[in-house]
Image (cartoon, helix red, strand yellow):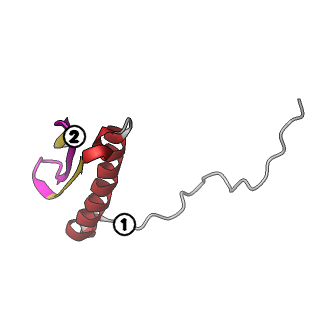
Amino acid sequence: VTTASLLRDRARLTCLLGCRLEILSPQGARLGFVEAQASRVVTGPEAERPRAADLVLRRTMDDLNVEFEFQLRRNLKDWLVTAGPVPGGAGEVTQEELPKP
């Protein structure tokens, strides 16, 4: 996390979030990186609601998640692999009988 702020100024809430991921070699050389930022502003009566800070933070986190994934897929695509099923993992449970009390 490079930036995290939630500011209230009268009838205004401003949220700013940022993150950065770096890929380093064993020797510490930077092989790649990605950065993302997201911000949201809420004003007026919506900013004065009881859960306004929580909602603007959650929405900004959602925006950051989307932007980070976009930047990751665009800038570090050579580092991404498709994940398959984990070998030796538990089988799917479709129904389980529970003991009667």
Q: Residues within 10 Å of mark 1 (few under 14, many from 20)?
A: few
Q: Earlier in the sequence, mark 1 or mark 2?
A: 2
- The residue nearer to you, when weighing 94 against 61, is 61
**Residue type at numbered disc 2:** Ala
| Percent coordinates x, y for residue 42 in the rendering | 25, 49
Left or right: 60 as drawn, with respect to 28? right
Which residue is under mark 1? Answer: 81
- The residue nearer to you, when weighing 76 against 89, is 76
| Percent coordinates x, y for residue 79 in the rendering | 27, 64
Q: Residues within 10 Å of mark 2 (few under 14, many from 20)?
A: few
- The dot on residue 11 is 2
Q: Which residues are magenta?
A: 6-31
Decide whether residue 16 is among the magenta residues: yes
| Percent coordinates x, y for residue 57 in the rendering | 31, 44
- The residue nearer to you, when weighing 3 against 97, is 3
Mark 1 to mark 2 CA distance (whole Å): 46 Å
Taking the spot 90% from the left edge, 34% from the top edge, the residue there is 100
Q: Which quadrant holds residue 3?
A: top left
Residue extending farthest to the front is 45
| Percent coordinates x, y for residue 44 in the rendering | 25, 46
Taking the spot 86% from the left edge, 35% from the top edge, the residue there is 99
